[in-house]
Amino acid sequence: MLKATSTKDKSAVGHKLLYLIAAILLLASLVTTFFGKKGFLDIQRQKKRYSELEAQIKEYDQKIEKLKAEIKDLQTNPLSLEKEARERLWLIKPEEKMIVRKKTETSGQPAAGH
């Protein structure tokens, strides 16, 4: 009778150990599914980064198109070329006068009365 009881105890302990190992494996797989490399959270971060990069690409594409249009305008329209040269290089015609206003140190706005 003593032998039968110890066999039952061993099989009960074996079942408990088997359940414990299965629970540990399940927990480990859940943790790696969410937090591991290429886990759920990592995939969500990568999707967000991908969306941000797509938005940047669209923004840069718009800037490129704007600059291409500006280049084409400068190549074909002499008035826009003259305007750009006058603004960037401070070029003036001989009969023109240029008024330069000083900026104040604090606000960056032109000084009043100067």
Image (spheres, rainbow, N blue to C red):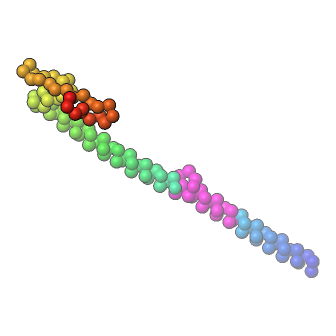
Asked if 5 appears above or below 86 in the picture, the reply is below
Q: Position of residue 99 (x, y in %)?
A: 16, 26
Q: Position of residue 109 (x, y in %)?
A: 26, 35
Q: Quadrant of residue 73?
A: top left
Q: Position of residue 63 (x, y in %)?
A: 27, 40
Residue, x 64% and y 62% (percent of image)? Answer: 27
Q: Is residue 50 left or right of residue 105?
A: right
Judge whether residue 75 can be spotted in this image.
no
Magenta residues: mostly which secondary structure? Answer: helix
Residues in magenta, as a range? 22-40
Q: 112 or 102: which is nearer to us?
A: 112
Is 30 one of the magenta-colored residues?
A: yes
Residue, x 23% and y 40% (percent of image)? Answer: 65
Asked if 99 appears above or below 27 in the picture, the reply is above
Q: Is residue 33 left or right of residue 13?
A: left
Q: 58 or 103: which is nearer to us?
A: 103
Q: Position of residue 25 (x, y in %)?
A: 66, 61
Is 27 one of the magenta-colored residues?
A: yes
Q: Is residue 93 left or right of residue 28?
A: left
